[in-house]
Structure formats: structure tokens, C-alpha cells
Image (cartoon, grey):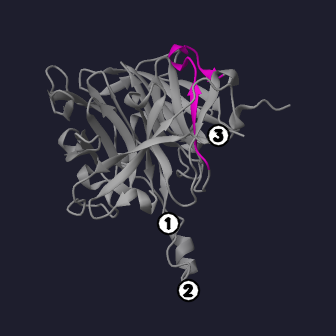
Amino acid sequence: MPQTAPVSHQVALAFHDWRPLRHVEDPLHKDLSAVARAGDSLFVACDETASVERLSRQPDGSYGAHAHFALDAFFDLPEGDGGEMDIEGLCANGGYLWIVGSHSLKRAKPKGEDDGKSAEALERMERIEREPNRFFLGRIPLIEERPGLFTPVARGGERRPASARCGQKRGALERWLRRDAHLAPFLDIPSKENGFDVEGLAVRGDRVWLGLRGPVLRGHAVVIEMTLKVTSKGRLKARRIDGRRYRKHLLDTRGLGIRDMRLDGEDLLLLVGPTMSIEGPAYVLRWRGAARQDVAGVVDPDRIREVAELPYRLHADHPEGLELWPEAGPDALLVIYDAPAPERVDPERFTVQADVICTETRRSGGLLHRRTR
């Protein structure tokens, strides 16, 4: 059986009071969905907002001095700052902070089923909602104000914010995938029902990888790879690769969806966990040589290795994001959680503890990738 990855230590993430923020029902520190690091700056996102939050490294190794950046200051969002973006991926690369929304639909939650209103609850669940801000993919220039402190700006020299088209009815990624034999049928299915749901983001230069929580196809998770350019109108647009605007890679994850990704040299680390609204374990996998992959298709299982099983807790500590953490060792990762366990949280100081875990890159396999007859 695989061994649970040891937690090296924890890193405190301290936020300002979240209550003045509009449209936010839960404290930011209890609802983190993505993380990215640039120098001594840690960027995180809450999936209820249309913003990113920056925390700065403090002398004791914690992260604080919270700064809030509303994304409608950089982009013309279809629903402005009042529309939830469901940000699920962040990546700092090449002087930019990259951001991706889930690109997913959602089904209305049932309410009233326990108080004699089961019919109303059933009717409510007929509603499938499309929130246009969720269909976002873009980047913002970062400038280094002082050593290690990076700030998103509307202009950094010749660099400016750019995004793929994100409209009220259909976004760019939706248009590019509408004829895809594997993915098109899932574009109209809500997330957490094995519908289309972007949750992982990795970037190197003009190459972008999007990891899908759903759909999972016959036990295989999907990674979409694109090479992006900026048009004369300042839009991000995918170049054609082999006649399409993307490559599609299928990885045998034994039915688990991708929750986050990060490039590590030529390899791609994938945080994987349950696709549907169920409780279950999470793992970190290593796709060896992903950055050298130049053809679409099903990835050879021998190139996928389990490097960590994350601690599992029922109804708490759902792993949502990971980032390389080299100061703790060459194989160390920072992991942030949604629904953090009570002992992680200091509600008076708006603080939550993230884990630094030690992975084992030389493992030859594990529970996920033992060959079966």
C-alpha cells in the first residue's frame, strides 16, 4: 500500500478581515481554490470572488500583509466584479500571473427538502446556471516593487493584461472544443456531475496546460495543451496545432480528476482527487516528460508515477492547490485546502495553515499504477 506523504511543516497564511468584501459568504481563508508563488509573494484565489489575493513572506516564514486585487480593474468581465469567477488555477510565469476560471456550469442546490418542500427542491434542481465570469483565461503583468515583492499591474513596460474572449453566451475555449468528440458532450453538463470543469493550470512561456476535474473518460483524466498568442486587439488566442487549437492528453488516473498542476522541470505534477461531489483520497502524480510531449493521445502509463498520497479526512481538508516549495527540499510541495479542518484555522486572526509535504520522486509506482491483468 502507498505511504501517506509526510508533512514537513506548516505555513501560516494570514488574511485581513474578509467581511467588507461583497458577494463573499465564507471567510477567504476557508475557501481557497488556487495558489501560485512569485519570489516572496504568494497569490491565492477564493472561488466566490472575482479577485486574487497576495500574501507576502514575513520574517518568521509565515505569509501575511494581505493585498486584494479586483480583476475588473484589469479586464472587462461580462458580469463585472459582482459575478463569481470560480477561479481554480493560478500560475506565475514569465513575468505574468496567469488565471483560469472553471469554465463550468452549475446545478442549483436543493433547498427545503427537509421541511415539507421536497417538490420545490426538485424543481429548483432543474435549473442549470451559466455564470459568464467563470469562462475566463487571462494573464496580468507582474512588476517587482522590491526584492521578492511582486504586484499585478495594468501595464508593465510593454506588457499588458490579456485574456481569451469571455462572453455572455460562449467563451473562446468553449468554441474551440465544441466539435471535440470526447469533450463536447460534457460542455453542457454541470461540474461535479462529471461535466466539463477546469481546475488545473500550468504555464511555460506561451504554452498553457489546463487540467480537467471532469470529465473523466473511462478512468482517464484530461489535460488540454495550447500555445497562445496575443492578437492585435490584445486577446489571447490559441495557435493551431495539427489542425486544431489544442492538444488533448488522456492520463490513466483510475477515475480521479485533476485538481491542480505544476511544472517541475520537464515533468508535470498533478494533484488528483474525486471528480464528483464525494469524499475520497487525493494523490500527487508525476507525468514524466510532459513538456517534451509533442503529440496528442493517451499517455503511456509507465510515464505516470504516484509520488505522494495526501492525508485524507472525511468532510475536511480537501486539497485544492499545490506549488513547488524548494526551500524545504528539492521534492517539497506546498498544499492548500478547501474546507480546512478546525485545527488549521484561527478565526480571530483570519489565518489558515497550509502543509509543506515531502514527495518521493523515485518511487516506481503505487496504488494507482500497479499493472492489472
Of the two numbered discs 1 and 2 on the same chain, state the one appearing first in sequence.
Answer: 1
Tell me if residue 99 can be seen. no
- The stretch in magenta equals 281-299
Q: Does 201 sit left or right of 13 as displayed?
A: right
Q: Does 144 sit left or right of 96 as displayed?
A: left
Secondary structure beneath dot 1 equals: loop
Task: Return the mark for residue 62.
Answer: none
Taking depth in this image into account, of 326 and 83 the one nearest to the observer is 326
Image quarter of residue 305? top right
Circle 2 is placed at which residue position? Answer: 116
Circle 1 is placed at which residue position? Answer: 109
Task: Return the mark for residue 3.
Answer: 3
Tell me if residue 231 can be seen. yes
Extreme residue in the right direction? 373
Foreground label between 3 and 2: 3
Secondary structure beneath dot 3 equals: loop
